Image (cartoon, rainbow, N blue to C red):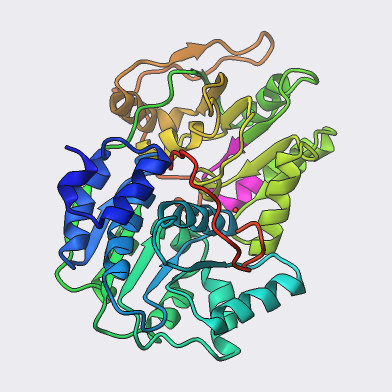
Amino acid sequence: MTFDDFKLDYDVLDGIEAMGYRNPTPIQQQAIPIIMDGKDLIACAQTGTGKTAAFVLPLLDKIVNMPAEGINTLILVPTRELAIQIDQQIEAMSYYIDVKSIAVYGGGSGISWTQQKQALSTGTDIIIATPGRLIAQMQMGGLDFSKLKHLVLDEADRMLDMGFYDDLLRIVSALPVKRQTLCFSATMPPKIRALTAKLMVDPEQISIAISKPATGITQQAYMAHDEQKHKLVLHLLKPGTYKSVIIFSSSKDKVKRVEAELRRAKINAKAFHSDLKQEEREELLQQFRNQKVTVLVGTDVLSRGIDIDGIDLVINYDVPPDPEDYVHRIGRTARAERMGTAITFISDKDQRRFASIEKLIDRSIDKLPLPEGYGPAPEYDPNRRGGGHGHGHGDKKKKWKGNNGQKKSKPKPKPKTE
């Protein structure tokens, strides 16, 4: 199959060719025809599958063949970085057509707020926005959604994990009831099902199988009792061993506790979780990216969509609640064809969870012996009666427009992945 098979507008096809796309990915093959048919869609697909182009391309085709009547498409995303990334991709894909887009996000200066408002008031076809900043702009007035035709929720599970549920409902209440709604999410928990039931009419559903971990990741595990984990972390983080580390835990309370223990040990660590404001999260990520922070301790809010290269080590302080979350977590390392290490601590009650992970990725992960002097470790036997029934550690799965929103002449498209 080629992109020509979708009968897209010729100028849209020229943009695809200039971007370096040759053949559609599985998510694009399935989603593009559904979207072009005008149907609502729930798509379960993770980052890296080509999902952005899966909704951007058919929407560009629709917009270019519609009369310009105001804001046509609203794309809601969890983070500033994703808003900028999608806006840049739209600019590249729409190089040969007259389509305007703007990224609306928080965490910027007063100048960026003014520029975003001015750009919105002068008119645009597509808005890519974080929920909080969009509501702030809506409260200032001047946003007319009466002609809106398309609503996209991208990384919907992350938006809900970050506490945007009420914001999403508030935004949707200001949109026309008659519209096409698209939801893209890496996971499909019950809360996503409940949300889409409120927003959609007879949606089509597609699911793309989760990727296997990158081949550049060395996967290891330690059997460890909870009281052995802190000492083991300090052993792994000996000075000079790793430059950039992410530690995952499944609860905010444990994340804060691990951060405090590391800081007492003079390790440059900070906690990342859903209690932080968006501006605080963005600042912390920038500090981590610039290596002003060496160790980031976080919940699964950190496990997807954080595009930071050079992470040497990922530690799972506990086994994630969902096997797919394991793949998302360790996928933070070994990016851009680099090498990386992922180490998981398995307590006695987490054994069956870890066995499910090994089944998902179709391999057995090496279990390393604890360093000398740590005492006996649990025996790995996930099939024994009474072993590995753990039901979590608290909360379950708590869970770049460079001109600050101001439009400029379009750059020539460059080949991109998602």
Of all residues shown, which one is farthest toward the bottom? 141
Q: Nearer the viewer, residue 201 or 149?
A: 149
Q: How many numbered marks does the figure carry?
A: 0
Q: Nearer the viewer, residue 23 or 338?
A: 23
Q: Position of residue 44 (x, y in %)?
A: 29, 50
Quadrant where the N terminus sits is top left
Please state if 408 lies on the left or on the right of 154 as rendered.
right
Membership of 253 in magenta stretch? yes
Q: Position of residue 240 (x, y in %)?
A: 79, 18
Membership of 304 in magenta stretch? no
Identify the residue shown where x is 30% and y is 49%. 13
Q: Quadrant of residue 283?
A: bottom right
Q: Is residue 104 above or below residue 274?
A: below
Q: Quadrant of residue 239?
A: top right
Q: Is residue 151 above or below residue 377?
A: below
Q: Is residue 57 above or below residue 289?
A: below
Q: Which residues are magenta?
A: 247-256
Identify the residue shown where x is 22% and y is 53%. 32
Q: Position of residue 212 (x, y in %)?
A: 35, 27
Please state if 405 lies on the left or on the right of 26 as rendered.
right
The reply to whether residue 114 is visible in this rendering is yes
Quadrant where the C terminus sits is top left
Q: Position of residue 354 (x, y in %)?
A: 39, 28
The reply to whether residue 322 is visible in this rendering is no
Please state if 237 lies on the left or on the right of 7 as rendered.
right
Q: Quadrant of residue 405?
A: bottom right
Q: Nearer the viewer, residue 27 or 390?
A: 27
Identify the residue shown where x is 69% and y is 62%. 279
